[in-house]
Image (cartoon, rainbow, N blue to C red):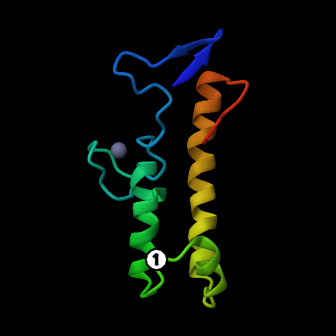
């Protein structure tokens, strides 16, 4: 959602401000929305758990602190760095489009 002049704006299909389907990687995995490389496919919690599992780690259900502590090859740190890159890439599009005063990711 957006808040514009103290009023909530949800858009025609009530998804305004939803950034999960912003594509940030043209060659990324196919999303249910039929695009490639959506944030949802790349940096969601589900995607994170899949990536950790694919690394061979048995710590899939650990919290992020435990994952980082046990991350001797640096795989999780690299994942998180990539996630920051993708999130920044998507948010920069939002910033250029909407010029918001504040972005609340909570
Ligand atoms: Zn999508």
89 sits left or right of 55 in the view: right
Residue 34 lies, in percent from the top left, at: 26, 44
> In the image shown, does 22 or 43 lie closer to the viewer?
43
x 62%, y 83%: residue: 74
**In the figure, 102 relative to 77: above or below?**
above
Residue 103 position by quadrant: top right
46 sits left or right of 92 in the view: left
Residue 17 lies, in percent from the top left, at: 50, 29
**In the figure, 70 relative to 104: above or below?**
below
User: How many discs mark residues in the rendered view?
Assistant: 1
Image quadrant, ligand 1: top left
Q: Find the residue positioned furthest to the right.
A: 101
Q: Which residue is mark 1?
A: 52
Residue 73 lies, in percent from the top left, at: 60, 89
x 56%, y 22%: residue: 2
**In the figure, 48 relative to 27: above or below?**
below
Circle 1 packing at 10 Å, graded few (<14), some (14-19), many (20+), is some
> In the image shown, does 92 or 27 lie closer to the viewer?
92
x 30%, y 54%: residue: 30
Q: Find the residue positioned furthest to the bottom.
A: 72
x 39%, y 80%: residue: 54
Residue 5 lies, in percent from the top left, at: 65, 9
36 sits left or right of 92 in the view: left
Label 1 beta carbon within 8 A of ligand 1: no
Q: Quadrant of the C terminus?
A: top right
Residue 27 position by quadrant: bottom left
Where disc 1 sits, the SS reads helix
């Amino acid at each position: 959602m957006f808040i514009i002049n103290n009023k909530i704006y949800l858009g025609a299909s009530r998804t305004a401000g939803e950034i999960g389907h912003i594509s940030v990687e043209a060659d990324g995995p196919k999303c249910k929305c039929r695009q490639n490389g959506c944030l949802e496919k790349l940096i969601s919690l589900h995607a994170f758990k899949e990536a950790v599992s694919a690394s061979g780690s048995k710590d899939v259900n650990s919290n992020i602190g435990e994952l980082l502590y046990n991350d001797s090859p640096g795989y999780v740190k690299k994942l998180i760095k990539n996630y920051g890159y993708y999130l920044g890439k998507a948010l920069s599009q939002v910033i250029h489009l909407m010029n918001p005063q504040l972005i609340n990711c909570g």
